[in-house]
Amino acid sequence: MWWEEGVDEPFYYTTATAYYPSGNSTWTAEAMEWIGRDGDLTWVAYTDVSSCEVSIEGADSYSTACTGKAVTPAVTVKSGDTVLVNGTDYSVAYSNNVDPGTAAITVTGIGNNKGTIKKTFTIDKADQTVTVSAAASVVAGKTAQITAGGTGVLTYSSSKTSVATVSGSGVITAKKPGTVKITVKAAGDSYYNAASKTVTVKVTLAAGKISSLTNTSSGIKIKWSKVTGASGYYIYRKTSSGSYKKIKTIQSTSTLSYTDTAVKSKNGTAYTYKVVPYSGSTKGSFEAQKTVRLTGTTLSGVSSPSSKKMAVKWAQKTNVTGYQIQYSTSSTFASGNKTAKVSGATKVSKTISSLKKGKTYYVRIRTYKTVSGKTYYSAWSSAKKVKIS
């Protein structure tokens, strides 16, 4: 039986187990003896859990890296200064403790104890870490793929779209030199908060590439490939034993050639050129290319001395390996061209046989020089024509 304060009649002449509230100063030995006089009462102290102090491990608001598993924080139950024992003095039941939100803990007295008490705690969404792998630098005009990981839909953004853009699938398109921050955001889901990570990408200029170095009558003509993002180009020249000297600044993105007239008369001299793209104070790298300046020769005479033959004469040149003759029935040398090579700088004539009788041929000549296994040519001379006898 449960004896509670305020009951008028004591349990005289009763044999039973009597329960009294633990820690209540009213229940002295003298009082309990009076209540149960002339009877046989066994007195047992009990704790009413509903009046206990219950604390949840960590805090009343409980955060966890929730992944769909039940969250069961430990509890501490105290009656005054006495810490009760889980499984002996009380039991614990959890509810709504899987998904983020408000979860509940119900503590129920067991054994000699009675009552219940409910506490709540919060399951927060977990923080997540977004991973991003991106190239530290991308050449203007090129693309690069970002590799990213995170929970929820991934979105991408660029801090400077004029420097580089980024697509919805994480493809960076570099536009012009500069530094840009690419941010990857993961939207999160039912269990994870949204998060983001930002990486810095530098956009650089591509190397200046010379497409051709050609000897012309007025000098060496330099042609190069267009570099995306460049606002212009610096042209440099050096001799074999010298250092680079800037000879021209091209302040245009559409100009892709320049003729170095300063070397017009430097027959047989080797030069190395480089074209460096620039944008503001940013310079690209370069790929240097070597050539030999060759001045051309002129035809002094073209005749047909005998049937199906042509005699070609020209002015002698120094600092050359030889001469190359080109002849064709086309006045523009558009098709059907044939060549004859003459080795030796001192030679100044050649007879060409097996030509078509009655046909008119157009003839031109240029010098050549072979250096370290590579052959360089001068510009073509003006053409002369001859009718074959």
Image (spheres, rainbow, N blue to C red):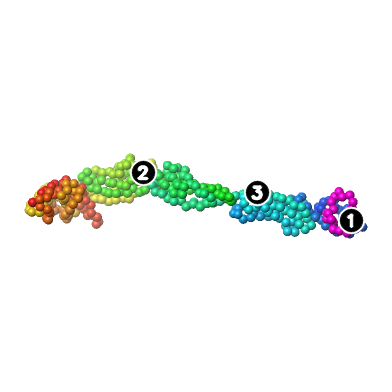
In this rendering, which labeled residue sits more in front, label 1 or label 3?
3
Instruction: Kindly identify the amino acid type of the residue bearing the numbered disc 2.
Output: Ala
Percent across and percent down for residue 155 are 49, 47
Q: Magenta-highlighted stretch: main secondary structure?
A: loop
Residue 15 falls inside the magenta stretch: yes
Report the quarter where the N terminus lies. bottom right
Instruction: Kindly identify which residue carries mark 2.
Output: 230
Instruction: Kindly identify which residue carries mark 1.
Output: 36
Q: Say what secondary structure mark 3 lies in.
A: strand
Say if residue 203 shows up in the picture: no
Q: Which mark is residue 329?
A: none
Residue 172 falls inside the magenta stretch: no
**Spatial separation of the CA atoms under disc 3 and disc 2:** 59 Å
Percent across and percent down for residue 198 are 50, 47
Left or right: where 332 falls relative to 148:
left
**Spatial separation of the CA atoms under disc 1 and disc 3:** 48 Å
Q: Residue at x 33, y 45 (%)?
A: 226
Q: Say what secondary structure mark 2 lies in.
A: loop
Q: Say what secondary structure mark 1 lies in.
A: loop
Q: Which mark is residue 102?
A: 3
Percent across and percent down for residue 306 are 7, 53
Q: Residue at x 47, y 52 (%)?
A: 147
Within 10 Å of disc 1 (Cα), the crowding (few <14, some 14-19, many 20+) is many
Q: Tell me where the magenta segment starts and ends, as one range.
A: 1-20
